[in-house]
Image: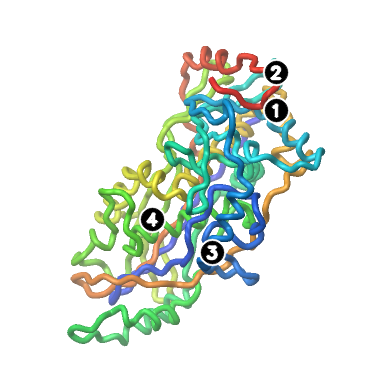
Amino acid sequence: MKRCPTASRKTSWLIRLSVAAALIGAAFALPPAIAGLGGFGNNAVGGVMIDASGLVRSATLDERAEMLRDLRNNVAEPQGEMADATEMRMVSLRKLQSAIQESLRSGKGLSADVQMLAGLQRVEYVFVYPEQNDIVLAGPAEAWVVRDDASVVGKTTGRPVLLLSDLVTAFRSVDASRNGGISVSIEPTAEGRQKLNRVLSRVRLQAGQDPRNLEPTLREAFGPQTVKLSNISETSHFARVLLAADYQMKRLAMALDQAPVDGLPSYLEMARNEKHAGNENPRWWMACNYNALKHDADKLAWRLSGQGVKTLTEQDAFTNDGNAVQTGRQGDTAKKWAELMTERFDALAEKTTVFGDLRNLMDLSVVATLVMQEGLDQTSGCDLGVLMGSAEEIPLVSYEIPKAVSPECSFIHGRSGWTVTASGGVDINPFAVIEKQELDPSLVNLRETAGEDKGIRWWWNG
C-alpha cells in the first residue's frame, strides 16, 4: 500500500563574515567501503577515529596500517565465476536471506561475498517474481580488491561495491525517512558564530601579514561543530559514509584538498576577488539525481538510471544572533561550482571512494523505498524479515556516535576583504525519486531472461 511521503529537508551549513574566507570542517580521512569486518568496529571507519565522547579525530599512521592489515586478513577475494566482470549480476533477496540464516545458524559468520552482495557495484534493475516468492536486484559487478586506503573496490573500474550492512540499514530506515528523508550536516553553533564575528571585528591585517597566523584564534572562537544525522541509525556504516562525503565535499570546495580530477577548481579559487554581501554565504548539499523510474505494465520489472548524485546550492543569510536564514537565491559562482561538482562526479567517484560509497547508499535507499512503497514484497510474497530485522538478527558493526568535529581553516582574500566560510550537507529523499515513473514495456523480456532458473545459488550472472 502506498503512503504519501513528506517533503525533503535540505540540511547543510555555511557562514560568511565580512573579514575572512575559510572552511571550518572536520579533520578525518575517508572511510573504507566495507563494514562489519575486523576488530576496529567500535571506533574506526578507515581513517576516522571516534573517542568515547563522540569527538572525531584522524587515525595515526600506525592505527591506519593496523586497520588495513586487519581488513585484508578478513576480506577474501572472489573466486570462480564471481570473479568475472559482468554488466548483469543478479542477487536473489529470498536466497540471500536463506544464505545469511544458514551462515548464522552454523556459527561460521557471514562470508565476504555475502557482506559485499556478490560484488554488485550499482543496482540498475529490480525484478519481482511472484511465482518464486522472490525479488531480484541486478546490476554491474566484478572482482573486488582492498586498496591501500582501506576501501573495497572493483579490480578494474575502481568503483566501490555495495554492502549488505548498508542494504539492511536502508530497509530499516524507510519508515523513518518518510519524515524529511535521510540527512547529515556538520553545523556551527550560533554562539560560535557570534564569538567568531567578535574576534574578526577586531582584526586589522597589516601589509604583508599572513592571515594563516589567525587560525588558532579562529578555531578557538568558532569551537567544535555539531554533527546532525536525521532518520538514520547514528551508529551505522551508512551514517559514517554520509558524514565523510559531506566533509570531503567541503574540503574540495574550500581548497583544503585539491580535486583528484581535472576541471574542478575550488570554490575559493573561482570566487577570488569577487565582492560578496557580508551577511550571506552559499551552502552546498549533495542530493539524489535519478531519471524517472521505468517499469513494465504489471510493475514487476523496474529500472533505475541516472548519475545518482548531484550537488545543489543556495544562499544563506545570517542574523546578528548567529542564526542562518535561507534566502532561496543562488550565487552565480556557487551555482557554477555545484554544476562542476555534478559534472565531474563520476570521475570523482573513481578517485575518491567515499563519493562512490555515497552513490551506493542512494541506490540502496531508492531500492528499499521502492520495494516497501510499491508493496513489492507483498506482490512477490517475499518475506524480508531477515533484512528488516524481524527474523534472524544480522550482526552489524555498531560505531560510536559522532557528536562533534574540531574546526580547521583555509583563507582567501576577496575585494570585500577576508571571509570565513563553512559549508556542506547530504540529503537523500528516496520518496521523491520513486514518485517519478514511466512505462517501459521492453522490461518484460529482460525480466524473463534475468529470472531463468540458475539453480540454488543466491546470485548468478546474466
Q: Position of residue 14 (x, y in %)?
A: 39, 64
Looking at the image, residue 237 sits to the left or right of residue 263; the answer is: right
Q: Name the element at disc 3.
A: strand
Q: Nearer the viewer, mark 1 or mark 3?
A: 1
Looking at the image, residue 359 sits to the left or right of residue 105; the answer is: left
Q: Which residue is nearer to you in this view: 392 or 71?
A: 71
Q: Position of residue 337 (x, y in %)?
A: 29, 53
N-term mark: 4 or 1: 1
- Judging by the rendered image, the residue that carries numbered circle 2 is 132
Looking at the image, residue 409 sits to the left or right of residue 71; the answer is: left
- Judging by the rendered image, the residue that carries numbered circle 1 is 94
**Dot 2 amino acid type:** Gln
- Judging by the rendered image, the residue that carries numbered circle 4 is 284
- For image coordinates 46% across by 23% down, the residue present is 438
Q: Nearer the viewer, mark 2 or mark 4?
A: 2
Circle 3 crowding by C-alpha within 10 Å: few under 14, some 14–19, many from 20: some
N-term mark: 3 or 2: 2
- Judging by the rendered image, the residue that carries numbered circle 3 is 227
Q: Which residue is nearer to you in this view: 335 or 119?
A: 119
**Dot 4 amino acid type:** Trp
Question: Which scheme is used to colour this image of the protein?
Answer: rainbow
Q: Position of residue 432 (x, y in %)?
A: 50, 39
Position of the N terminus, as image quadrant, is: top right
State whether residue 319 is above or below residue 98: below
Q: Name the element at disc 4.
A: strand
Q: CA distance from mark 4 to mark 1?
A: 39 Å
Q: Name the element at disc 2.
A: helix
**Dot 3 amino acid type:** Val
Q: Position of residue 400 (x, y in %)?
A: 64, 62
Circle 2 crowding by C-alpha within 10 Å: few under 14, some 14–19, many from 20: few
